[in-house]
Image (cartoon, rainbow, N blue to C red):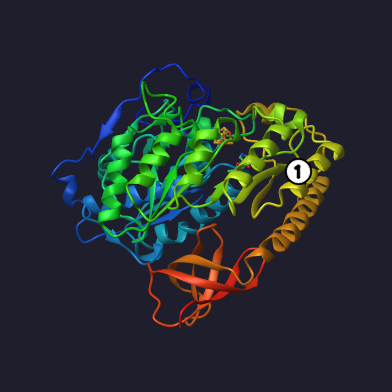
Amino acid sequence: MTIRIRDTWHLPDQKQAGRRIEKHSPTIRGLNITEKQRAIGAGKTYFISTYGCQANERDSENLSGILEACGFTAAADASEADVILMNTCGIRENASNNVLGEVGSHKKHFKARPDTIIGVCGCMVQEEHFTRTLLEKYPWVHLIFGTHNFAELPAYIERAMNGEKVVEVYSREGEIYEELPEHRQGRYKGLVNIMYGCDKFCTYCIVPYTRGRQRSREADAILDEVRTLKKLGYREITLLGQNVNAYGKDLEDAMDFAGLLEETAKTGIERVRFMTSHPWDFTEEMIDVISRYDNIMPCIHLPLQSGDDEILRRMGRRYTSAEYMNLFNTIRERVPGCSISTDIIVGFPGESDEAFEHTLDVVRECRFDNAFTFIFSPRPGTPAARMEDETEEKTKKERLFRLNALWNQLALENHQKYLGQTVQVLVDGPSKKNPNVFAGYSQHGMPVNFTGENIHEGDLVDVEITDVHTFSLNGRKVGE
Ligand code: 5AD
Ligand code: SF4
């Protein structure tokens, strides 16, 4: 189907999104909402499905809060909701395909109840080709908006309820949101944005285009949010950013990430986590702070991406494998027992067998506690998508298989150290498979399944480890 682009629509423009011109990011405080819009959801329900990373999870908490400010309440299932929103991820093609699968599945809801507003928002729609696909092939989608204009959602919903097809995707460098309504998912674990966007422009990555320029929130706003969560009974917070170690570099006279982490620890909240770290911006001071505060969890996600220097250069990662290893070893020495997880891409354009072996060499040295491994997925508009890529798909799959087999085996060996140890677990609740078994995460970020009496969601429990697996630990509560 060819589409007629309407004058009222704003479509994404990735070239524009990749520009970095503005010096200051506007701060948007609160929600733009009229009295009428506060009542448009009365008696109606919403359903949000969230794809991708924790930044999207946090965004969905705000989207829920905004819809509730319009009077909507949460529906248990998409089939009965009046507004269905898909908050999407476009980092790899399969992420987007999963979203499109769900968009397709909502056609039946639209047919059964044509008043249903089906909306797609978030990173994927910031990519030109996906928004076009949505417009061409999924006419039951009546609301499309990107990552930059949440505060306008009440107006978009109102327009869509009046029968308009709303397409509002802006490719600007972005703003900072403060004081948006929220409906948090957890009662004990909270996500706290410290920055938005990314300026690293790794050559394979779409994020600098979909989420715009790096914009750090003011430290006071972040610390106030942490203190408020603590007062509300939250026991763990995760400081979130695409590249947390670069925190503050875009602000004048600001704290750096080491300072922010230290101030966060000083609030006394029981557990502090942070993600994601870029090795290039990781400083000695940060390691020092992590080692000095017991409430900063010994658990770091440190993407490697490749162990080959030429591939790292072509990825624009700004470090060599030796520099990565140096940082890795310093962390392991200075933060005893620190678990380190990573991200690795195989099949980047030009990755030879030898280059791939270099990645395996680094994995052998590091024995990561966890790894997220991906086959390179060309994202239209990024430099790597234009690079020549001669490696066959079959070879890439074999590399992924070998890489996974290796890190799995080493992680299992590595986790033997937990046998007989007592770890501290923040309880998420009974496990999905067995109500007598409880699940939570240790301070090292390991999923732990354990048994015991008198255990509740939100408890911090000492658990003796009796059994270890590649991805999780088993144990029993100590002291009973
Ligand atoms: N192809 C494959 N993996 C990617 N990642 C980011 N972009 C791509 C891409 N185009 C991976 C990186 C990153 C993680 C979040 O996703 O490993 O760290
Ligand atoms: Fe993407 Fe690199 Fe930024 Fe991470 S640091 S979001 S991989 S551009």
Any atom of ligand 1 within 8 Å of the CB at mark 1? no
Name the one closer to the observer, 93 or 293: 293
Residue at x 70%, y 27% (from the top left corner): 386
Name the one closer to the observer, 441 or 147: 441
| Relative image position of residue 7 (x, y in whole percent) | 37, 27
Image quarter for ligand 2 equals top right
Lateral position of residue 203 relative to residue 268, left or right: right
Residue 468 lies, with reference to residue 349, above or below; the image says below
Name the one closer to the observer, 4 or 370: 370
Kindly tell me whether residue 131 is visible in this rendering. no
| Relative image position of residue 335 (x, y in whole percent) | 57, 47
Kindly tell me whether residue 76 is visible in this rendering. yes
Residue 152 lies, with reference to residue 479, above or below; the image says above
Check the picture and name the quadrant holding the N terminus: top right
Residue 99 lies, with reference to residue 30, above or below; the image says below
**Image quarter for residue 361?**
top right
Residue at x 53%, y 66% (from the top left corner): 423
| Relative image position of residue 264 (x, y in whole percent) | 37, 44
Lateral position of residue 73 relative to residue 433, left or right: left
**Image quarter for residue 304?**
top right
| Relative image position of residue 352 (x, y in whole percent) | 84, 36
Crowdedness near tag 1: few (<14), some (14–19) or many (≥20) residues, C-alpha within 10 Å: some
Name the outermost residue toward the right: 354
Helix, strand or loop status at disc 1 = helix
Residue at x 74%, y 57% (from the top left corner): 410
Residue at x 68%, y 66% (from the top left corner): 416
Residue highlighted by disc 1 = 362
Amino acid type, residue under disc 1 in the picture: Val
